[in-house]
Each structure stands twice: as C-alpha cells, then as structure tokens.
Amino acid sequence: MSLFVFGYFTLLIAGSSAAAYYKRSEAFGVLFTVTLASMLFGILWGQVAFWTVGIIFASLAAAAGLGYCFRAYMVMLLPEQASRFMKSAPLTASFGLLVIIITLLFAIFAEQIAPFGERQIVGDVWEPATAEFLLGTDNLGRDMFSRLIYGAQTTIAVALAAGILSFSIGMFLSFTAAVVGGWVDQVLSRINDLMLAIPTLIFALVVLAALPQNIFVLVAVMAVIDQTRVFRLGRALAIDIVVQDYVEAARLRGEGWFWIIFREILPNVLTPLIAEFGLRFAFAILFLSSLSFLGLGIQPPEADWGGMVKDNKDGIIFLVPAALYPGAAIAILAVCVNMVVDWLLNRTASLKGGRG
Amino acid sequence: MSMLLQVRDLKIGATAYPPGEDPIDIGIVHGVSFDLEKGKVIGLIGESGAGKSTIGLAALAYGRGGVRITGGSVLLDGKDILRYTKAGIRDIRGRHVCYVAQSAAAGFNPAMRLADQVIEATVLHNIMGRAEALERARYLFGVLGLPDPDNFGTRYPHQVSGGQLQRAMTAMALCSRPDLIVFDEPTTALDVTTQIDVLAAIKHAIEETETAAIYITHDLAVVAQISDDIMVLQHGNTVEYGSVQQIIEEPHEQYTRDLISIRSDIKPEQPDQSGALLKLEGIDAEYGPNAKVLFDVTIHLPKGQTLAVVGESGSGKSTTARVITGLLPPSKGQVLFDGQPLPPALKDRSKDQLRELQMIYQMADTAMNPRQTVAEIIGRPLTFYFGLRGEERRRKVTELLDMIEMGDPFAERYPAELSGGQKQRVCIARSLAAQPRLLICDEPTSALDPLVAEGILKLLLELQAETGVSYLFITHDIATVRAIADSIAVMYMGKVVRFGPKSKVLNPPFDDYTDLLLKSVPEMELGWLEKALAGRKMAAAGN
C-alpha cells in the first residue's frame, strides 16, 4: 500500500470522526460517504478511482463553497431587507442563483463575450477542444463555445417571453374566473380542461406544423399551452382568497373587478406564483429544446441548445462529445432554476402562518 | 384522600424561528403548581395565550407542535410521568389520562361509526374486550343523556349534532375508566342552549364515574358550575389559585376581579324608539330552492340606536345581515333605509347607499388584506368615497386611528403585527372612514378574550355617542346584548320570535324559546347549573 493511499484514508477517517464528534451531521455524511465510496471503488479499479472520486467530490465541494461565498457576498452587498432574505437561502439555492446570474450575463452580452460569430465556420468538422476552440467545433465546423453562448441568448429569451406571456394570460383568465364565478368560470374552466387533456408536445407539433415558422408564433404557441397550468394554479389560489372577508368587504364597498383582482387578490398569491414561474421557466427551456430537437423550434442556422444537441447527436457514435455540452447546459440551468424555486417555495410555505 | 395529580413548578417553553435570525427560546409556562385529588375537578381559566391548554396537555406528558416541557414535574399517582419512556407514556395515555378536545367535529373520523371510535383506545389498551367496551359505551351514552343510547353508536359523526358529538367525545374519554380527564374548552364552540346540556352531562358523568378532571375554559361562569378548585392564569403565570367559593366570592387579585365583573355595567335603553333608520318588511330569503332560511322577518332600527339580533348558530342572524348588505337579495319583502327602499342586489345600489351601510366582521383576521398596511386599509374608503389623497388622506387616517385609541405609529404596520383586539379596532376604523349611518356588527367580539371584547364594546358605545351611528349588532351572547342594546330581536329557525325594546324583551312574560335562551346563559353564581336544570325539569313537568 502506497503512502498516498494510507494518507488518503487517514485524512478521510480523521475528518469523518471529527465531524461526528462535533455533531456536524451533514459534513459527517458527506465525508463518510466519500470514505466508503473510495474503499469500494478502490478495490474495484485501484488507485485511479481515488482520483475520480476525489475530483467528483471536490467539484461538489467547490460548488458548495462557491454557493457559500456567493451568499455571504450578497448578504454583504444587498440592503437590509433583501440581505435578511438572502441569509435564509440554502447553499443549493445560492449556487443556483449564481449560475443563473452568470448564464444571464452570458446571454445578455453574447456579442461581446463570444470569441467567434454565431454562424461563422472557423475550422474542421468536430475538432477536439483546443485553446482556440474551448469546446471544439460542431458538425459544420462552427465554434461550439460561441454557439453555446448565442444559444443561451435565444433559449432564455424565448423561454422567458413564453413564460411571461403564459403567466399574463393564465393569471388574468384564472382570476377573472374566480372573481366573476358562475358561467364565466364554468366556460373558462371547461375550455382549460379540454386543453389539458391534449398531450402538449403533440398539440404543439400539430399547431407549429400548420402555422408559419417564426419566433413569435413559437412563443405564442408555447405560452398558450403553458397557460393551462398557470390557470389551474391561479384559479385554485384565487378561489381561496375570493371567499375571504376582506374581499367581501371590498365588494360591499363597491369596488370593481380591477381593484379586487389587482389589489386584493394578486398581492396575496404573488409568492406562490413567482415560485411557479421559476418552475415553468425551467419547463419552458426543456419544452423549447424538445421542439428544436424535433425540428419545429428555433430554425437553423440560429443557435439554440436543443437544436445544437440535434445537430451534433451523430457525433456521439464517433466519441465526439459536442452534443453533450448543450445537453449539460440545459440540465444545469434547469437544475439551478429548480434549486432556487425550491427555496422560494419553502419560504412561501413557512410564510403562510404569518400571512393568515 | 390521596393526591392523584401533583404538578410542581411546571415550566414549558418553545423555540421560535424568526426568518433570517437566530432561533429564540421563549417561555410559555413559568413554574405552575397545583394538586388534584381523586374525583375532584380543577378549572384552569385565562385568556388565550395564558398557557391553559399547554398545562392541560402536560398532564398527558404531551407538548403540542414543538412545545417542550423544560422543567418541573408532573406526578400521577406519585410517579413523575415526565421521566417515563415513550412506551410508558403511551400506556398512560388513554388508560389513566384522557383528553377531550374543543372541536369534537374535527376530532372524529368521519368514515367510522361513533361506537368504534369511542371504544377504540379502550380496546387497544386491552382494558376490556370489545363486547364489554361496547356495553360500557352504551351505558355512558345513557349517562351523558344521548338519545337512544343503545343505537347511538351505530351512527356516523355527520349524523349527530355538535353538542351530541361533544358528549360522544366525553364518552370516549370516560370509556377506559381513566383516573383523570383533561377537558379543553369542551363547550366553547357550542350554543348556550346546547352548552347547558353538555355541561350538565359532563358534570353528571364525572360524579357518576368518580373521575378527576382538569377543566380548561375562558368562561369563569362555566367553570364555576363544574369545578372544586380554580386556577386563574395569565401569560403562563398563576394569578390566583383557590377554591371556587373563594375565587368567585372573594377574589384577591385585581385581574380575577376584572374577569368576574365583566359586562356588569349596563347601558340604559333609549326611551324613544319610534323613527326608523332601517326597516325590514316581511323578508324571506333562501339559498336556492328548498333551502329557505328566513321567514317573514320584520324588524326596525331607530336612528342612533342599537338593535341586537340574538340567536343560536343557524338561526338566520348572519343571513339577515347578508340581505341588508345586498349580498343575498331577498325572495320576498323589502329593506327600507331612511324611508327609501334599498335595491335588493348589491350591484344596483349607488355608491352613497353603499357608503352609508358598513360592516364589521367576526374574524378581524380575515377581514383585512394581510398585504396592506393599516394606513392603506383605513385610507381606501377615504379615497374611494371621498376622493381624498396624499396629505389630506394621511391626516384623516391619523384622526381615525386616534378615534380607535391606537395612534399614528400603527399606520405603517401590517395586520399580522397587530393583536386580536387591535385588528378589530382597525376594522372599526375602516368602516367609520366611510362615515356610515348604519354599522352592521357580525359577532365582532365573539372571537376575542373577555377583557379585550369589553374594550371593543366600550369603544363602539363611545363612537355611537360621538358620531350618532346606528348599530345592528349580531351576537349569540346575552351578556353583550344586555350591555349595549336598545332594542332586541330574538331569532330562532329563521323567524323573529320576539322583537321590541330591551326592557320588554328581557323581562317576563316570555315566550318558550326566549325563556330557554335566557335561562341557559351561565351566571357567575355557585349552584346556578343545578337551579337552571331544576327549573327546566319543572317546566317540562308543567307542560
């Protein structure tokens, strides 16, 4: 047994014991999992496995550390109230927020950051990663890294636009249904049920195949399909509020629908709706990527993450990892948005007592 | 007599987690001690937050949702149950100590027959077999005065009334022949006419089975009927502890005296009740076909006076208010306001008609938008009806806050940052902002502690003297009615059974229902329950 292996296990076991002794159950869990995993993989694959396990956990630790630092940084920079809010963020949410901010910056300043143009053919097909082409080139010899950055722009812009539009439609319709009630509610709800009953992807494919292919139609279709989910949630939330005495008080005062919807109901359902918005945003990215992968989303040569997976999927057969980068980007952004949303949802749940 | 339960220096605490800050430990009960002999009843009394339920549950070695017992001892038969293991405690609960909750309706499983639920714990603890337990359940149903005791248990919870359900829960507690039962406000949610039956049943059952009991309530008059000793609690401290006689007849502490003397001062009734601001003529109302709730309601309310509408839950009091406000257009009859007929539906009324008629709700919590500050809540009617904005509106809000004795610093607070009484005051200020001529108060004090409620009533009376506003006061509490009303309408099953000036309605000759209602109101007097029951029996024999 080499000195390296001996030192490796000594450190891990000492660390786990210390964590257990000081009752830091989370740290203990992580450290001891690493120890056990190292033992298992060490027996199976020898010393190389230690490096693999080490690198995986080191990157997780780096992500956690980054999240920790970012939270501390935000707490320091933000004003009083926002910083107290930030303090309650778990490490996952803080890391997720950081990634989202970085992605947004990349998307906004794509022209300035990307080393090459979106459609510029700069090298051979599927060149490996070099100092010049950070992630290699794609199936037409365009720079992968640059296209990933431009792709972020399109993907996020379309998903965001579709999300905002679907929330505007869904919230307006659902609040109207809840406040007015009666047959208006019945008609809106039944139409919504009908829409919900149709599989979304098939529905989108049929509609998009029939309509002219441009980005506005795409956003509109995505929004209309997505608003059914918003409607369901919005109506459920609003119907709870509508029966409250303060809404009755507003009605007795003679207030119109507009006031009741925007001043009495909306502020009380805003937190769960914002959380839902984050979730639907992640779904919108995935949905757009699926559409692009099937060829009905963003049209080439414009870059978008789903389309890039499709363009480069054949490379996987030849061990070219080009398709994996946009795939990983979709996965990481979706996971990060979800981590932030989880935190917001938890806060909503814990706020309920105080709201009542 | 041996001591069954000895509570010594009981301390109970919890941890609060304010968002974004470090957790804080807070004390809920600060060292309370009392003794309970076998077969005796101790009453724990205090306002909400006094720690009475928490102490009661500690007798079962139980801390509700995050509450921890941090010190002291609870000796049951000389053994400290706080030091028991989980299995030991489980053995005590349901065998030696039982619990009767406030809301029986929420405590029963709607999918199981009553008898199965009543005997469940007894059978589970192997105290007796199923057949024997059912036999005892039937006996207890009889003792508790439930109808048809032999078959009562075969019903489901939704098939019996609230009062019967509360008695079934008492039967559940008594079934295993426990040494001690903890009653946590068992009659608070019931109507007075039902409350007296349940009280009598509980008292009879306790005597019959020689069980000891801890009786928790905020109503001193109720606890005086049933306990041997009383402990008055405030903010988790013992204020006074003594026999019923001593507490009721010669209380030592000011706080106890306040509790006893509540609503003893009565407002004199206005002599002239001729002119009517509000007049209801032959109102019928229904929630859909076959759901008629009001029958020929005819009442009137003179200007600047108070009309109290009294009745049990389901008697149509709140529906009457809904008809007047226009939320439920009547199917027959009309509402006259200052001589002019009001349009039946809300949407047909003019802004001025809406303004002149404001409402105060029972639950101030839900009557205010939790996302608006006090200034926004009170300011909205000012803007809406009078178009006040900016500095002008701001000044008027301050004025209104002064009127409700709260002051300017409250303007920027949210409802969640106010106490129950303060919330109700803000609601009153919001109604007053519209400068109404009629204020409909739908049980504005019934969700409040007695001393706080007293403050609200005093405020309402002062405001009436100041602004000349009329009140339509809906309540089930006769003591409140005595304190504030000029005229009274007694409602029963959707009909007005008695209407007139206070002096006439509350004095004989009575009709049957008013008589029953008045005699069911607990009085702060020893032996009242026996007298009331005897009176009832005589009446029944006379019939």
Image (cartoon, rainbow, N blue to C red):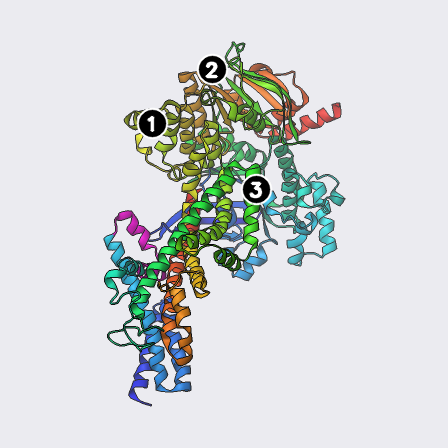
**The residue under label 2 is which amino acid type?**
Gly
Disc 2: which chain? B
Quadrant for the C terminus of chain B, please. top right
Do residues under tags 1 and 2 come within 8 Å of each other at their CB atoms?
Answer: no
Question: Please, what secondary structure does the residue beneath circle 2 have?
Answer: loop
- SS at badge 3: helix
A227 in magenta:
no
Within the image, what quadrant is residue B528 found in?
Answer: top right
- Label 3: how many residues lie within 10 Å, few (<14), some (14-19) or many (20+)? few
Q: Main secondary structure of the magenta part?
A: helix
Q: Nearer the viewer, residue B223 or B438?
A: B438
**Circle 1 marks a residue in which chain?**
B
Q: Is residue B212 above or below residue B474?
A: below
Percent position (x, y) of residue B408? 31, 30
Label 1: few (<14), some (14–19) or many (≥20) C-alpha neighbours in 10 Å: many
Q: Which mark is residue B304?
A: 2
The image position of residue B140, as x and y in percent, is 70, 44
Q: Foreground: A1 or B83?
A: A1
Give the magenta range: A78-100
Kindly report which numbered mark, 3 or 2, lies closer to the viewer in this rendering.
3
Q: Is residue A84 magenta?
A: yes
Judge by depth and name the residue closer to the eye, B95 or B186. B186
Q: Position of residue B273 (x, y in %)?
A: 53, 11
Would you identify the image quadrant in which residue A255 lies?
A: top left
Within 10 Å of disc 2 (Cα), the crowding (few <14, some 14-19, many 20+) is many
Name the mark on residue A279: none
- The residue that mark 3 highlights is A187
